[in-house]
Image: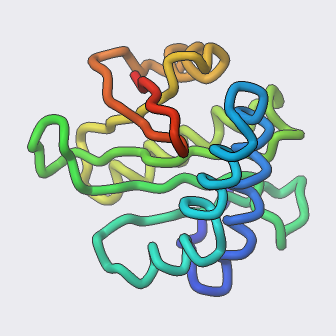
Amino acid sequence: MKLVAMTKMDTSKVSKLAQESFVATYAEFNTPEDMQNHLQQQLSVDAFDALLADGDGDQVYLAYDDGFDRDIPIGFFQFSPRDWQSGNRKAVEILRFYIQPDVIGGGFGRKLMEACVDQARELGYSLIWLGVWDRNQRAIGFYQRLGFAHVGEKTFVLGSDVQSDW
């Protein structure tokens, strides 16, 4: 798996992948209005362009796999060095971890998380936070199998719906 830092030229690819993955995972549990609001405000090309421009330290990495079209990422993850939970300067939060919906279950999620953890270590982080919706049992099981543990809860707002993340 090859990781590439997101550039301005990649934001449309990342937005497309993020929206497809988010809709495939969450559409059945949320209202169309809340979904559309989130897609437009958080996962649009403009939102990823703004993320690149704001300079707050967030980093997005696209993952490419040899068995797939090199122009289309198989997944991506977004780090945020702002650690609100512990105040630990060596901590990073994985804000987004998305994979193409049609390859879920094929081992690519594990490969992507391994690449994500390796990249965090390479950047000098020793603690990784990850939030997951408390109703997303598939993702919870995946993260637990990879060694992540439930250590608390935080709020996630999707449109008008206040949700709980572990």
**In the image, 31: left or right of 115?**
right
Labels in figure, total: 0
Which is more toward the observer, 74 or 152?
152
Which is more toward the observer, 83 or 69?
83
Q: Residue at x 33, y 49 (%)?
A: 121
Residue 44 position (above or below residue 35):
below
Residue 120 position (above or below residue 138):
below
The x and y percentages for residue 140 are 55, 18
Q: Could you say which quadrant of the image residue 14 lies in?
A: bottom right
**In the image, 126: left or right of 44?**
left
Which is more toward the observer, 71 or 47?
47
The x and y percentages for residue 93 are 34, 45
Residue 105 position (above or below residue 66):
above
Q: Residue at x 48, y 56 (%)?
A: 78
Q: Could you say which quadrant of the image residue 59 lies in?
A: bottom left
Which is more toward the observer, 10 or 20?
20
On the rendered image, what quadrant is the C terminus found in? top left
Q: Residue at x 34, y 56 (%)?
A: 80
Q: Residue at x 19, y 44 (%)?
A: 84
Q: Could you say which quadrant of the image residue 22 lies in?
A: top right
**In the image, 154: left or right of 44?**
left
- Colouring scheme applied when the structure was drawn: rainbow
